[in-house]
Image (cartoon, rainbow, N blue to C red):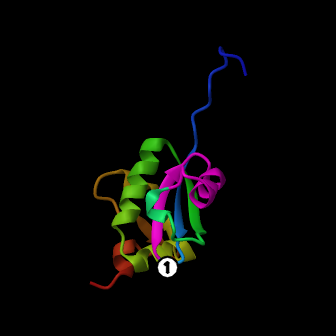
Amino acid sequence: MNENTPKSPSQWSVYIIQTRLNTLYTGVTTDVDRRFKEHQETKKGAKYLKGKGPLILMWHERVGSKSDALKIEHYIKQLKRKDKSALIEGRFFLDKSILKKKAPLVKALNHMSYEESCPH
């Protein structure tokens, strides 16, 4: 690629890693495999994960822009453990409408809304 060739925009992903202590870490990257290896093998990994291996990449999803990835990461970090587990297990999926203010994060695969699926 020469300097006049326009770069394609990066595709950002959100990922969840499980530690040996069964805690979940959520992050964003443009290359999930590379970032996971950094967490496991280099000093470039998150300080939170240091000494908590072995690590397991539990879930990841490509979401588009860095801005979208950061918004989704923040929202996932606010979820309760049971809701993160449901996302990992595929009982829920990301609904990109969360990028709008006050929208629910996930919807059940059977088209039930997230709020309907959680008892109040």
Q: Which residue is mark 1?
A: 22
Q: Residue at x 41, y 49 (%)?
A: 70
* Relative vertical location of residue 65 with respect to residue 48 in this rendering, above or below: above
Q: Secondary structure at mark 1?
A: loop
In the image, residue 24 lies in the stretch drawn in magenta? yes
Q: Residue at x 28, y 58 (%)?
A: 102
Please count the marks in the image: 1
Along the line of sight, the residue nearer the viewer: 50 or 74: 50
In the image, residue 85 lies in the stretch drawn in magenta? no
Q: Position of residue 73 (x, y in %)?
A: 42, 57
Which image quadrant is residue 33 in? bottom right
Dot 1 surroundings within 10 Å: few (below 14), some, or many (20 or more)? Answer: few
* Relative vertical location of residue 7 with respect to residue 37 in this rendering, above or below: above
* Relative vertical location of residue 35 with respect to residue 11 in this rendering, above or below: below
Q: Position of residue 23 (x, y in %)?
A: 46, 75
Q: Position of residue 112 (x, y in %)?
A: 43, 75
Along the line of sight, the residue nearer the viewer: 57 or 40: 40
Q: Residue at x 45, y 69 (%)?
A: 107
| Amino acid type at image mark 1 | Asn
Report the residue that reaches farthest toward the bottom: 119
Along the line of sight, the residue nearer the viewer: 49 or 111: 49
**Taking 21 as reference, is 9 left or right?**
right
Along the line of sight, the residue nearer the viewer: 119 or 85: 85
Residue 95 visible in this rendered orientation of the protein: no
Which image quadrant is residue 78 in? bottom left
Q: Quadrant of the N terminus?
A: top right
The residues colored magenta run: 23-45
Report the residue that reaches farthest toward the right: 1
